[in-house]
Image (spheres, rainbow, N blue to C red):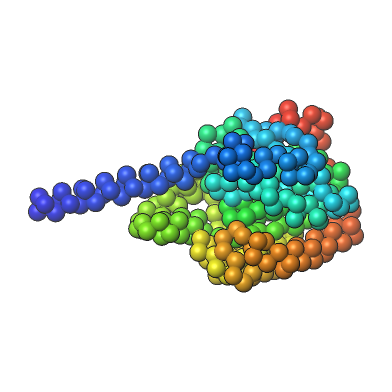
Amino acid sequence: MGLLILLSAAAGLIVVVGTWSLIWVMTHPPRRTYGWAVARQLPASPAEAGLRADEMTFNFRNGAHAPAWLIDGARPLGPVFIVVHGWSSSRYQVLGRVPLLARFASRVVVYDLRGHGDSSARNTRMGTLEVQDLIAVIDQTPTDDRPIVLFGPSMGAGICIAAATNNQAGRVAGVIAESTYRHLVEPIAAHLRCRGLPTQPFSALAALYVEAVLGGLRPFDRAHYAAKLRCPLLVIHGSEDIVCAQAPARQIADAAPHGRFLLIQGAGHANPAETDETGYLGAIETFVNEITERANSQPAPTRLPHNGHIAQQELSI
C-alpha cells in the first residue's frame, strides 16, 4: 500500500513538473531577432530584401509595444495586408514571404507578436491576448481607406480569424489562414510527438491552462470564430502537414459563411508557397481580386480617429 502511494505521488509529480515545463517552453519561445537573421545570412530589414518600408511601433492596452514595418506593395490601389506570424517566429522570419504578398497589396504590415522578436512583452499568450493586440494593430494602421486583408500562418492564422470577428466598421475585407489549427491541443501534441515525447496528459493540461488562465475561459475553437466571420476566409493547407491536421483546417473553412479551402499537395507545415508557388499565388490573387471588387462596390469604411502620431497612440480595448 505504501509503495502504491509512493508511485502515485511520483507519477503526480512527473505530470505537474512535465506540464509546467511544457507551459514555460510554450510561453517563452526563442526570440528571432536581428542577430538571428544576420547569423543565418537572411535579410534583416526590408531594405536588404529590396523593399521600401517605414518603421513604426504599435502600442497595446497593458503597456506592451511591438515594432513593425510598413512595406510598400506593388498595387497602389490594392488592400493593406497585415501579416501575423506564427509561434516561435518574428517579423524577421516572415520577411521572406512579404515579396509574394506585396504583389497584391498597396502595403504590407509586419509586426512582432508579444513574446517574439523585439516585442517588449516578456512572454507570449499563445494566441489569446494576441487577438486583442491585433484589433489594436488594425485600428492603428494607416490604410488610406484601403480594405484590410489579415494573413497569418499557424498560430497567426487563428489570431487573424478571431480578430476579424471584431470587424471595425467592415475594415477587414478578408482573411487568409495558412496551416491553421482548430484547437490548441493539436499543435502542442504534434510538437511533442515529433520529439518522441508522450503527448498525454501533458498537451491536454497545457492547452487547458492556456485557454482557462491566459485566455480567461474565452472560446478558443477557431471554427467557432470562423462561423462568425462576415468577410471571406481562405484556408490554405499542406497535405503533408504533421503539425496541424488537414481535417480541422477543413472544418474551419466549412464553418465560415464565405469560406474556401485550398489543399497544396506535398506541402508541410507553413511552407505551401515553397511547394507550389503557382497554385499558392493564383489562389491568393483570385481571393484578393474578389474581395477588392466587393469592397469597391460598398461605401468606404469608417475610419476611427487617431492623433496622427501612431507610435505614441494608445488604444483601450
Q: Residue at (62%, 43%) from the top-left corner?
A: 41
Q: Residue at (46%, 59%) from the top-left corner?
A: 190
Q: Residue 91 occupies which quadrant of the picture?
A: top right
Residue found at the very far left of the displayed protein: 1
The answer to which of 44 and 164 lies nearer the viewer is 44
Q: Position of residue 22 (x, y in %)?
A: 40, 47
Q: Is residue 30 left or right of residue 109?
A: left
Whether residue 42 is visible here, answered yes or no, is yes
As displayed, is residue 246 above or below residue 141?
A: below
As displayed, is residue 64 above or below residue 282?
A: above
Q: Position of residue 274 (x, y in %)?
A: 65, 61
Q: Position of residue 217 (x, y in %)?
A: 50, 48
Whether residue 261 is visible here, answered yes or no, is no
Q: Residue at (86%, 46%) from the top-left corner?
A: 145
Q: Position of residue 286 (x, y in %)?
A: 80, 66
The answer to which of 51 and 1 lies nearer the viewer is 51
Q: Quadrant of the C terminus?
A: top right
As displayed, is residue 91 above or below residue 121?
A: below
As displayed, is residue 207 above or below residue 120?
A: below
Q: Residue at (71%, 57%) from the top-left corner?
A: 175
